[in-house]
Structure formats: C-alpha cells, structure tokens
Amino acid sequence: MRKLASIVTIREVKDIPWSDTLSVASMQGKGWQVVIGRDSLKPGDRAVYFEIDSALPPTDARFDFLKEKCLKTWSLNGEVLKQTIRIKTMKIRGVVSQGLLMPLAEFPELANLPDGEDVTARLGVEHYDEVAAPFRAFDGTLRVSGEVLGEFPEFIPKTDEERIQNLTDCFETMKGKLFEVTSKDDGCSMTVYFSPSHFPTAPFGVCSRNKNLKDTDTNSLWEIARKYQLPSKLAHIGRELAFQGEFVGPGCNGNRDLYRESEWHVFRIWDIENACFLLPEERRELCRRYKIPHVPVIEEECPVFDRFRTVEEILAFAEGKTVHGHEREGLVFKEVGTGHPFSFKAVSNRYLLKLK
C-alpha cells in the first residue's frame, strides 16, 4: 500500500513575496513543496503530510476546510454514491503546491509516532484512483474489471513506482549508477503471464492492477491480449514470463494522448522461474522479435544522479512531448545491469497542472 500520509518535520519555510498570507514549506527527507498559510508552520515543527493522489475521508471534521474546493461527489439519479476529498497538484498564487501539510498538534492520536511513520490507514486515507475506479465504469467504453478469476498472482510483482520526491537520499547513495529512461504512459496497468507450473490447465492469463481476470469477450484487457496474439506468442517463447505494460486508448484515464484505438506498451518483463526482471536489452529484444509494442526509450544508460543534482532538475527533465505531440506524463527510471533494479518515476508538474 502506498504511503499517502506520514509524519514529517518541516525543513524550511519561505514566504511568497507577492502574498501577505502564504508561504512555501519543504520537509526533511522529501523533495515535495507545499503552499501553506503564513505562520502556520515553522522549521522544526512536526506535521502530517498528505501526498497528492490522497483521498481523505469527508467524515473527519479536521478536513472540513477543504470541502469547498476539493470535495468530489459521485451521484446516480440524484443519489449520492460516494464522496471523498481529493488532494492533487495545484498552482496557488503562481507557485506549484503538491500535497497537504497540517500541524501534528491537530492529530493528538499521532503525537508519539516517529518521523516517517505511515499513518495512511490510521487516518482513513485511500488512493484516489482506487476510490474513483468503480465509478469510471459508468463511462461504458472501457471494461477493465470484468469477471474476476482471482487475486493478482503472488508470484508476480505488482506494478508501482515510487516518486522521486520521496527518494532524496538517492542523490548520494545512487551516484555512479546507470538507468534506462522510458516515457511514462498515462493509462491502466495490464500484466499478461505464461506459467504452466502455476496454472497447468490454463497457463496464459491477463491481469489488471490488482486482479486476475477471466477470459471473456467483453473485457478490454483480454481484447488487447488477443489483438497482439499474446497467448500464442508467450507460449512460443517457451519460458515462464510475465509481461507488464500500460493499456492506453479510448475510455482509459480520459485518453489524454488521444489514441484512436487501444494499445498496450510493455515496460518490464518478470522471469517467473528465476524471480527476477529481464535486463533491459533482453526485454527490448523480445518485444522486437515478437512484435510486441514497447514504451518509448528516452535513454538506454543515463547517469541520473551524476547528471542531476536536485529533484527539481529531474522533474524538469521529465517534461516533454509524447510521440503524438501531447504533454508527456513523465518518465520512469530503471537501474540497468541487475535483475532486481532500483526504479522510480518522475511525473511532470506541467502535465499535472495541465490535467487539473
């Protein structure tokens, strides 16, 4: 589960010169910046930090001040089905603000917890995408949930990357390391696998981010698997592998890159038998040989933490255009030369602000 809410200590507070009421705060050990009320926090103060993508419970009165601008409601025929308070990237008085900082004193039940403690579950915080997912089905164009065969296979790692803003220590610990840099698609996670040892009677399968899905004619992920002939291709490879990639196209996350039809782009391959990821060059070669689309590669070997010295520089590098000429969501960085690579993502602030 992603750490969406945690205990932090304020590192620095700078007043916004053109505002009499606002300042910008940063935290120890993190690369995020948050616009706060003037004098609400000072360096050394402890606070609770809520990352972007947090969905806060509207029943907690401590978040009432956010409802006017941040309350999201889903309704059907006049009946309220669900409400949540969404935290996202914003531009406040010309300054990028990512997340929410509240003084720890407002949460007395957390007072004795150490810095870095994950308080996501304690405060009832959820990931906004998981809260919103059931209601996106009203669109009717994308059917990623479908009939569930079971939980996501435990022998395959789930797809999720940490943001660079939470990895500031890497500027010291990861110097000298090389990284493959790929474009980040804004779509839906999709995994396909071939594993006779785990599923002897039906070795090929298709998964969404969290579920193993039944093969039906009405499921969009299975449709794309058949489009690229993945059942026969993975069987022909003859190895127990899981291809993981991003499903993009009409009906998926707003189709912000304006694809005319659904596509799937591989970004990593898991070797099930050896419990490791294929090296980038082998992954790219398999995709070329079997005509399976691969995410665009920006650089094959980038000395990230030698070239860039700050989080802000990496975020600026993440900005750019997609192959269709639209604003890119960001970049993904994977360490090369190892089957257990350190990896992370940098999401473009320009993209997030444009999305808002």
Image (tube, grey):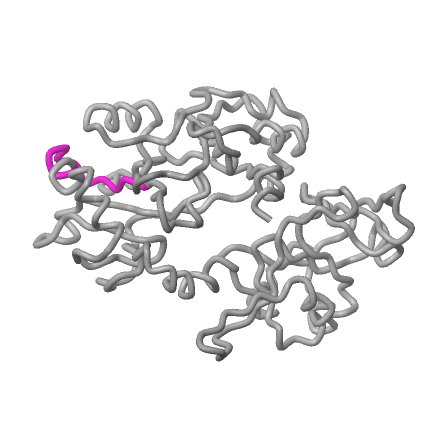
> In the image, is 244 to the left or to the right of 23?
left
- Kindly identify the residue that appears in the image at 57 percent across and 63 percent down: 55
Query: Quick one: 306 or 64, which is closer to the camera?
Result: 64
> In the image, is 221 to the left or to the right of 230?
right
Give the image quarter of residue 273. Answer: top left
- Kindly identify the residue that appears in the image at 45 percent across and 42 percent down: 186
Within the magenta stretch, is there residue 51?
A: no
Query: Quick one: 335 or 36, which is closer to the camera?
Result: 36
- The magenta segment is 234-244
Residue 209 x %, y %: 36, 53
Quick check: 1 above or below 32? Answer: below
Quick check: 186 above or below 127? Answer: above
Query: Quick one: 228 or 14, which is closer to the camera?
Result: 228
Residue 308 x %, y %: 63, 24
Furthest-bottom residue in view?
79
- Kindly identify the residue that appears in the image at 38 percent across and 60 percent down: 139
Residue 340 x %, y %: 39, 36
Residue 21 x %, y %: 88, 54
- Kindly identify the residue that appears in the image at 83 percent across and 52 percent down: 44
Give the image quarter of residue 245. Answer: top left
Quick check: 234 above or below 289? Answer: below
> In the image, is 334 to the left or to the right of 87?
left
